[in-house]
Image (cartoon, rainbow, N blue to C red):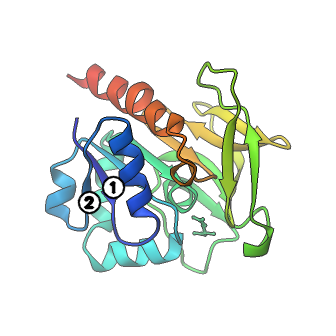
Amino acid sequence: MKVGVLALQGDVREHISALIACGVYPTSIRRPSELAAVDALVIPGGESTTIAHLAQIFGLFQPIRARIAAGMPVYGSCAGMILLADEILDAKAGQETFGGLDITVRRNAFGRQVDSFESDINFADGSDTPIRAVFIRAPWVEKIGKDIEVLAEIDSHPVAVRSKRILATSFHPELTGDHRIHRYFIEEVARTALQKVE
Ligand code: GLN
């Protein structure tokens, strides 16, 4: 399985290291031809408006949207979650997303940069050990569609959700050195989705 990391802005390097720790050797994606060569994509945390803007400039916006619509497995953390949501609240005027995940997210839901925090949360991957979650101007999920599974929440706000092929977290597992979420994406989401297609 070839996995790409969208490498326009944000914590690209940290996602690449986390994926390598899970045994996959990811490619950095900056052009449509690079996107066409991967089976699955990771969209890093950063700034969703900047990533969307750069994706337009690099000619990647429509190709990514089309690949997701065609069933490519994707994982997005924080800004990546926003970019995967079908609907955003508190969006910047005219802000567009790649979409594909039937959720409504609220940007900067936990407050401003100074309100960033860390917390141990339960993640529904079958393990009893809580996961350290880092929230940096994070979104939360305000509404979910009927085929969305909630994998983690804080104060009854979902902060990790999935559909069949798409995983999204409000927090940044790429920053903690704990690779459970990346492993979950590779093993439970991407590999499973791709096996069904083969
Ligand atoms: N608040 C940022 C946005 O709207 C996301 C922050 C992050 O990815 N850490 O894109």
The mark tally for this picture is 2
The residue that mark 2 highlights is: 28
Element under disc 2: strand
Element under disc 1: strand
The residue that mark 1 highlights is: 5
The answer to whether residue 112 is seen in the rendering is: yes
Q: Is residue 27 left or right of residue 173?
A: left
Dot 2 or dot 1: first in sequence order is 1
Q: Where is residue 34 shown, x and y percent of the image?
A: 17, 58
Residue 142 bears which disc, if any? Answer: none
Q: Where is residue 113 shown, x and y percent of the image?
A: 72, 74
Q: Is residue 58 left or right of residue 33?
A: right
Q: Amino acid at mark 1?
A: Val
The response on whether ligand 1 sits within 8 Å of label 1 is no
Q: Where is residue 112 shown, x and y percent of the image?
A: 76, 74
Residue 69, compared with residue 13, is above or below; it is above
Residue at x 28% of width, y 28% of height: 194
Between 143 and 115, the residue placed more toward the observer is 115
Q: Where is residue 157 shown, x and y percent of the image?
A: 78, 45
Assess whether mark 1 and mark 2 are in contact (beta carbons under 8 angstroms): yes
| Ligand 1 positioned in quadrant | bottom right
